[in-house]
Image (tube, helix red, strand yellow):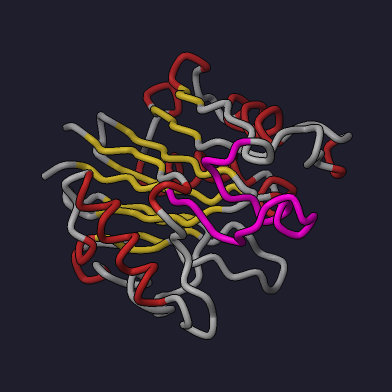
């Protein structure tokens, strides 16, 4: 089965709706245009709804046709750190700022996951836990899994203090490979989001080095 995996840039516009909904119409337009360029209808997508509360950043849920359009037009949908689908034509959509998006696909089981691997998640071994969730719940074999990673903040401006100031990607790779993912099955975009104007960075915005506090997005879908 063919799959679509893509990452937007600042050229595609902000992909996150503000809490006050003041930019809602523009973001919906941005999302629609970006997804349409990939042959995806926004009504067929479900957003990974990240909620920073509590102490659990390993919340994973399965979605299907009944969940299409959740989170794409407003803030509806259950909190999750990753979405999994076995439904072709079900697109998974994840807005990002200073974290890593990881698409994980099992070509033998036709199972697709889009996981938000942020600092909080990594401290709970979230990259490894994402793989283990697929193993435990879908019978996936890690040596079969294919992984795509978004750009991420670099070590110079965003060191991970809980991991001896190492970079996001160093830790993500370590956790994925500790779960049994083959290095040759990982497709990585090495772009540093803190110094590349094609990607939004919340930390750079807070530091006054980026004017817009936006989000780019990763999308993944098994083609029907």
Which quadrant of the figure has residue 44? bottom left
Answer above or below: position of 211 versus 114.
below
Left or right: 139 as drawn, with respect to 86: right
Taking 71 as reference, is 170 above or below it? above
Q: What predominant SS class does the magenta segment belong to?
A: loop
Residue 171 figure quarter: top right
Magenta stretch?
Answer: 196-217
Q: Is residue 110 magenta?
A: no
Along the viewing direction, whichever of 123 and 116 lies nearer the viewer: 116
Residue 144 appears left or right of 190: left
Image location (x, y in percent) of residue 114: 42, 48
Q: In the image, is residue 213 part of the stretch drawn in magenta?
A: yes
- What residue occupies the far left of the structure in this picture? 224
Q: Residue furthest bottom?
A: 20
Q: Position of residue 46 (x, y in %)?
A: 32, 63
| Residue 137 spot, x, y in % from top left | 40, 49
Q: Quadrant of the N terminus?
A: top left
In percent of width and height, residue 73 lies at: 33, 75
């Amino acid at each position: 089965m063919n799959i679509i995996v893509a990452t937007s840039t600042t050229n595609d516009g902000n992909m996150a709706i503000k809490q006050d909904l003041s930019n809602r119409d523009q973001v919906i337009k941005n999302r629609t245009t970006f997804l349409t360029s990939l042959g995806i209808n926004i009504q067929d997508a479900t957003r990974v709804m990240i909620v920073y509360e509590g102490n659990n950043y390993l919340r994973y849920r399965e979605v299907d046709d009944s969940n299409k359009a959740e989170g794409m037009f407003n803030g509806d949908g259950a909190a999750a750190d990753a979405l999994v689908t076995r439904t072709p034509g079900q697109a998974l959509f994840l807005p990002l700022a200073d974290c890593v998006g990881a698409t994980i696909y099992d070509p033998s089981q036709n199972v697709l996951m889009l996981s938000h691997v942020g600092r909080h998640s990594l401290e709970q071994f979230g990259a490894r836990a994402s793989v283990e969730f697929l193993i435990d719940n879908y019978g996936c074999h890690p040596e079969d899994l294919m992984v795509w990673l978004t750009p991420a903040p670099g070590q110079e401006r965003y060191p991970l203090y809980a991991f001896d100031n190492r970079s996001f990607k160093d830790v993500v790779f370590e956790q994925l490979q500790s779960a049994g993912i083959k290095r040759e099955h990982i497709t990585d975009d090495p772009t540093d989001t803190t110094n590349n104007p094609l990607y939004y960075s919340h930390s750079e915005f807070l530091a006054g080095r980026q004017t817009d506090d936006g989000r780019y997005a990763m999308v993944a879908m098994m083609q029907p």
